[in-house]
Structure formats: structure tokens, C-alpha cells
């Protein structure tokens, strides 16, 4: 599981419910003008005090980096810049931030050299690392994911980061646009007569010549978006409590039956495209009903499956296009 978010693969999340309280007055956008102090409560319950809206911000995980960029804040430091540019072209970096190391082990010295106003981290980062970061600058830790409410957690994180950076107005716009995108996508699928379609989304990797496939259950962010679109999640396996991801192999796909199957890979990571690679001549794969019927859809590269409203909006467009073509 750890291959997801730390090397384009998932790390286990164990964080408390995220709550946030901004300044009572003025609103965060007004605070940018007056530079009044801001006090927030992060996912760990820690109070985060800022002199004003943070301008020099470091992001230790790609989902928070995407949120920052979407909010109009160019981060001064980003973990694994090359990886972000490979996997998240839906919300590209607009500047050239300093690479602070890997998402699992950011460089404290590099971050300290940037003298940031704020470090935004997630609950995927080891507590010991977060403790070290707090010695460098204020740290806003958000819950990485929550399979019980994936979309709610995504927008909650966005709101908290917006309060810290004085961009609540932009956060409101992003959420409004995302809701509109969901409604538009749901209507498009209904109009095409494919509402309620059994749909399975996954990604896969080749590790030591073995293919590992990750089903995105209803508890995943993409799974939740699919259900908002009116699609029926075909996966029956149980996902993890944070990301809603499961694990299976090619034989496990035989349980899906006749479905629409979609996935995202990246040409920048050759290990992430087994469906058009090593499986192309695999007898189990080629015998699957959805493969035989041509109901396998590779969605465009660069849509980060664990991103924010903009990545998910791009995903909606891609999924609707694939199912209505």
C-alpha cells in the first residue's frame, strides 16, 4: 500500500478528525489586507498561530501542494517536484519551487533554508518528522484522507489551507465550480443513458515483475466522485479506512464481471501502465469480458487521484468523455 502517496503510491493514514477555526473577524481575505493574526486548529488538535496570511508556504504532500496552487499560492518548497510534475499536470506548478526531498522524508535543512511562514503537512508524514518541522516554522497538519467522507475531507482541507493563506474567497469559488462540474457530469451521463453503469476504477503497478492492482472502492475520493456522477461502483473488496483502496491481482479482476473499467497511469512512470504493458498478452486479462468488449478506458495522464477540486473536476470530464464516446 505504501507505493501510493510516497512513490505515487499510498501511505497509511491515522489522523484525528480535522477541525478548523479561523479569525472571527475580519474574514481571511480581509485579513490579508489588515495582516491580523490568524489562529487555526489542525488535524492533531494543535493550535497554529500565524502573524497574518502565510505567503511563503512549503507543502510536504502533493494534495496540499495542489490546493495551494489552486488557491493562487505558489509554494516556495515542494516535496518531490519531479513526481508532482509527472502525476499532477491538471494543476501545474506556476513557479519553480525548491525540491525539499521525498514526501516521506523531507529535508529539514532545505526547508529551514527557505524560512517559510508556514509548512502544510498531512497525517501521512511520521509524527517525529512533524515534530521536527514544528521547530522550523508553524506546521498546519491536515488529515490526508478519510474513507468515510472523501469529498468532505478534501474540501475541509482546502478550507483550512485557505484560512491560513487568506484565500477563502477562492476556496469558495473552487467548491462552487466543483459542485457545478459534478451536476454537469451527472446530467451528461444520464442524457447518454449510462447512469447507473457498473464501473470499476483502478490503477496498477509492476513491482519485481509482478502486477499489483489497486481497486478504488466507494471510500476512495474517486469512488465518491463516481457515485456523485450516478455510477455504481463494481468493486466488492474492502478498502482501507483512509484512502478507500484495496489490493488485488489479475485473477481478482475476474470477479468484476461485465463492467466499464477505467484507470490512470503515467508515461512518466513506466511501472504504472501494466494494462497496456505486461498484461496485453496475459490470458486472464485478455479473457475478461470488459477487455473483450473494449470497455477499458485509460483516462488522461496527470489527473492526481488524490488531489483537490480541480483534479477531480478534470477527472469528471475524463470519465464522462470515456463513457459517452
Image (tube, rainbow, N blue to C red):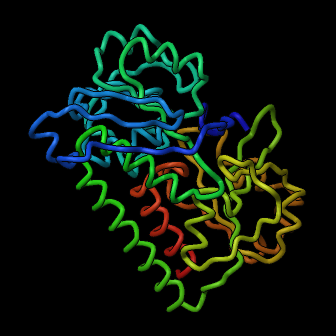
| Image coordinates for residue 59, horizontal then vertical, percent | 41, 30
Q: Residue at x 55, y 17 (%)?
A: 129
Please tell me how many numbered marks the rendered image carries.
0
Taking the image as shown, residue 286 lies to the left or right of residue 67, namely: right
| Image coordinates for residue 49, horizontal then vertical, percent | 32, 27
- On screen, residue 283 above or below 62: below
Residue 167 visible in this rendered orientation of the protein: yes
Residue 82 visible in this rendered orientation of the protein: no
| Image coordinates for residue 209, horizontal then vertical, percent | 81, 36
Q: In front: 102, or 161?
A: 161
Q: Residue at x 68, y 76 (%)?
A: 232
Which residue is situated farthest in the front direction here? 24
Q: In front: 266, or 13?
A: 13
| Image coordinates for residue 228, horizontal then vertical, percent | 55, 73
Q: Which quadrant of the figure has residue 9? A: top right
Q: Quadrant of the N terminus?
A: top right
Q: Residue at x 68, y 63 (%)?
A: 218
Taking the image as shown, residue 4 lies to the left or right of residue 129, namely: right
Taking the image as shown, residue 176 lies to the left or right of residue 295, namely: left
Which residue is situated farthest in the left direction here? 33
Q: Which quadrant of the figure has residue 200? A: bottom right
Q: In front: 228, or 304?
A: 228
Taking the image as shown, residue 119 lies to the left or right of residue 301, namely: left
Q: Residue at x 45, y 26 (%)?
A: 79
Q: Which quadrant of the figure has residue 314? A: bottom left
- On screen, residue 210 above or below 104: below
Amino acid at each position: 500500500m505504501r507505493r501510493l502517496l510516497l512513490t505515487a503510491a499510498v501511505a497509511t493514514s491515522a489522523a484525528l478528525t480535522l477541525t478548523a477555526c479561523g479569525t472571527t473577524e475580519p474574514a481571511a481575505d480581509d485579513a490579508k489586507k489588515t495582516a491580523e493574526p490568524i489562529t487555526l486548529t489542525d488535524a492533531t488538535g494543535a493550535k497554529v498561530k500565524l502573524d497574518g496570511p502565510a505567503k511563503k508556504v512549503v507543502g510536504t504532500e502533493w494534495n496540499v501542494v495542489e490546493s495551494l496552487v489552486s488557491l493562487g499560492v505558489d509554494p516556495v518548497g515542494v516535496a518531490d517536484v519531479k513526481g508532482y510534475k509527472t502525476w499532477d499536470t491538471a494543476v501545474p506548478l506556476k513557479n519553480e519551487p525548491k525540491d525539499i526531498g521525498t514526501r516521506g522524508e523531507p529535508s529539514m535543512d532545505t526547508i529551514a533554508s527557505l524560512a517559510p511562514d508556514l509548512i502544510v503537512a498531512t497525517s501521512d508524514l511520521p509524527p517525529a518528522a512533524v515534530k521536527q518541522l514544528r521547530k522550523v516554522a508553524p506546521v498546519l497538519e491536515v488529515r490526508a484522507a478519510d474513507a468515510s467522507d472523501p469529498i468532505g475531507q478534501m474540501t475541509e482541507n482546502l478550507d483550512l489551507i485557505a484560512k491560513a493563506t487568506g484565500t477563502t474567497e477562492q476556496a469558495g469559488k473552487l467548491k462552487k465550480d466543483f459542485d457545478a462540474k459534478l451536476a454537469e457530469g451527472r446530467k451528461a451521463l444520464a442524457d447518454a443513458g449510462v447512469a447507473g453503469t457498473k464501473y470499476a476504477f483502478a490503477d496498477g503497478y509492476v513491482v519485481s515483475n509482478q502486477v499489483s492492482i489497486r481497486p478504488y472502492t466507494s471510500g476512495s475520493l474517486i469512488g465518491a466522485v463516481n457515485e456523485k456522477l450516478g455510477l455504481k461502483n463494481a468493486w466488492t473488496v474492502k478498502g482501507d479506512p483512509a484512502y478507500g483502496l484495496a489490493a488485488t491481482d489479475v485473477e481478482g479482476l475476474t470477479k468484476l464481471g461485465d463492467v466499464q473499467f477505467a484507470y490512470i497511469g503515467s508515461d512518466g512512470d513506466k511501472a504504472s501502465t501494466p494494462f497496456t504493458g505486461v498484461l496485453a498478452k496475459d490470458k486472464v486479462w485478455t479473457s475478461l469480458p470488459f477487455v473483450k468488449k473494449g470497455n477499458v478506458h485509460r483516462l488522461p495522464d496527470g489527473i492526481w487521484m488524490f488531489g483537490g477540486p480541480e483534479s477531480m473536476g478534470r477527472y469528471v470530464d475524463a470519465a464522462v468523455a470515456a463513457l459517452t464516446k
